[in-house]
Image (tube, grey):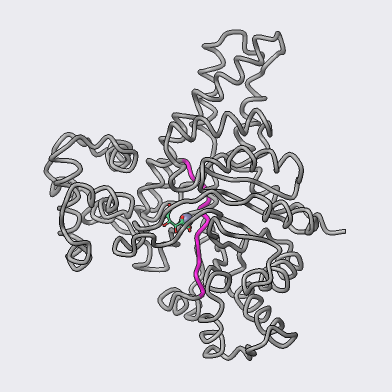
């Protein structure tokens, strides 16, 4: 069906976005059968580290005191300071309200216990079902940390995710703190030498292979500082060159790099104390140029890196860029970056991931993104239509299916190995 009016375009875009199932390719959520490490409910929503960062601007409280408080008390302080004493206009604060509204809980009262009562009596499994249905998210990709004792125990017990939850092997300590991590690996029975030699490489690879067997991960992931350089004669450079690249290539799984986080610039704020920095894109350029049989999923934290990242993807098809990560995930920036990516890459990218740390955040992260994409895509199709080119309903549905779901799965299936 050819669309002949802007209104027709907008209605079709809105409908297609609402009806399209989503694969959320990066979250910190867990399959409900993994137990308490899956965070959910109103107190978890309120104590999200984004809101901790914001409340610390309105209180003189020593952060150490805040962290010693019970979760319930922390939630009450944040509710009082960010929702009762002032208007919750920030993206993260408004997100709590959008989540309540979209889940059928009218956010009309400032009485927190009213909302707590709404969540009481629900189960994690039922809430997972409700949230995925509400957001039309059909697949959730987790972040699985083999260095986290609690999570290790769950995998060693034989627990495996339900079908619509997928594992990712997250290896930050291996790349960002190898000297301390090698002690851990030795404790776990890997014969890591002091020297970086064939034996050490073999044992690090054995560690990776063991977890690939256990988790069957869709990709291997790491977050990296703005100072990330490649190639580099460093622990990180060597582990990437001699372990990550060969192993991910062997299994034809992507290596996901999340670049640009300066960890703990204010350690008192813990997760809320991380910062952003512009990275030197040449590290990625070198990685891509030298490893054309590997696949790379990349997101960058700095707004200043977004243009060159999109241009780099025009040079290398084994690079798939994804999401508006963390401090980028604000409507004004999602709008700007998505337009730029469409103009440079057509629809050959993954516009968003939720990065949800709390289950119900999936609802607002996607609601806010869908609202932005409806405007951006309507304008883009209208620009095409106004040339006289026949834009059809089927075209729009196909493109949105690609960006929200298929680009990711197709990229996983791709094989650039000769
Ligand atoms: O490294 C990551 O996966 C980041 O997303 C997290 O560490 C970060 O704390 C976060 O929650 C961002 O949204
Ligand atoms: Zn994340």
Q: Residue at x 23, y 52 (%)?
A: 56
Q: Is residue 198 left or right of residue 179?
A: right
Q: Nearer the viewer, residue 140 or 374?
A: 374
Q: Residue at x 46, y 58 (%)?
A: 262
Residue 114 x/y as whole percent: 14, 45
Which quarter of the figure has residue 218?
bottom right
Position of the N terminus, as image quadrant, is top right
Q: Magenta includes 268?
A: no
Q: Nearer the viewer, residue 378 or 233?
A: 233
**Residue projecting furthest to the right:** 418
Residue 382 x/y as whole percent: 60, 15
Part of the protein shown in magenta = 136-146
Looking at the image, is 29 positioned above or below residue 22?
A: below
Q: Magenta includes 143?
A: yes
Which quarter of the figure has residue 166?
bottom right
Q: Nearer the viewer, residue 256 or 219?
A: 256
Which quarter of the figure has residue 169?
bottom right
The total number of labels drawn is: 0
Q: Residue at x 50, y 70 (%)?
A: 145
Residue 261 x/y as whole percent: 48, 56
Looking at the image, is 55 positioned above or below residue 332?
A: below
Position of the C terminus, as image quadrant, is bottom right
Q: Nearer the viewer, residue 83 or 196?
A: 196
Residue 4 x/y as whole percent: 62, 8
Ligand 1 found in image quarter: bottom left
Q: Residue at x 68, y 61 (%)?
A: 230
């Amino acid at each position: 069906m050819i669309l002949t009016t802007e209104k027709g375009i907008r209605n079709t875009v809105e409908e297609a976005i609402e009806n399209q199932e989503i694969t959320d390719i990066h979250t910190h959520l867990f399959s409900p059968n993994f137990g308490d490490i899956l965070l959910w409910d109103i107190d978890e929503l309120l104590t999200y580290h984004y809101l901790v960062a914001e409340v610390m601007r309105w209180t003189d409280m020593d952060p150490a005191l805040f962290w010693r408080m019970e979760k319930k008390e922390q939630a009450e302080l944040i509710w009082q300071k960010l929702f009762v004493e002032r208007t919750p206009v920030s993206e993260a604060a408004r997100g709590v309200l959008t989540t309540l509204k979209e889940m059928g809980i009218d956010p009309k009262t400032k009485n927190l216990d009213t909302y707590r009562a709404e969540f009481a009596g629900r189960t994690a499994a039922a809430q997972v079902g409700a949230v995925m249905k509400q957001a039309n998210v059909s697949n959730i990709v987790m972040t699985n940390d083999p260095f986290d004792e609690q999570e290790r125990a769950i995998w060693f017990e034989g627990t495996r995710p339900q079908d619509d939850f997928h594992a990712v092997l997250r290896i930050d300590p291996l790349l960002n703190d190898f000297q301390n991590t090698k002690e851990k690996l030795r404790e776990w029975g890997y014969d890591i030498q002091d020297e970086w030699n064939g034996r050490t490489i073999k044992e690090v690879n054995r560690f990776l292979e063991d977890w690939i067997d256990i988790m069957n991960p869709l990709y291997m992931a790491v977050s990296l500082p703005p100072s990330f350089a490649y190639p580099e004669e460093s622990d990180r450079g060597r582990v990437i060159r001699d372990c990550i690249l060969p192993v991910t290539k062997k299994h034809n799984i992507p290596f996901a790099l999340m670049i640009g986080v300066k960890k703990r610039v204010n350690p008192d704020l813990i997760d809320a104390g991380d910062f952003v920095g512009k990275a030197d894109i040449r590290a990625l350029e070198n990685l891509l140029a030298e490893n054309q049989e590997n696949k790379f999923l990349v997101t960058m934290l700095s707004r200043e890196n977004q243009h060159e990242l999109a241009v780099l993807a025009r040079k290398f098809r084994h690079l798939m860029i994804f999401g508006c990560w963390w401090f980028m995930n604000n409507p004004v920036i999602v709008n700007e970056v998505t337009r730029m990516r469409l103009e440079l890459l057509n629809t050959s990218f993954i516009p968003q991931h939720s990065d949800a740390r709390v289950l119900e955040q999936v609802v607002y992260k996607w609601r806010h993104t869908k609202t932005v994409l409806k405007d951006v895509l309507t304008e883009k199709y209208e620009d095409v239509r106004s040339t006289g080119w026949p834009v059809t309903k089927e075209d729009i549905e196909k493109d949105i299916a690609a960006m929200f779901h298929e680009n990711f799965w197709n990229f996983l299936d791709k094989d650039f190995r000769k």
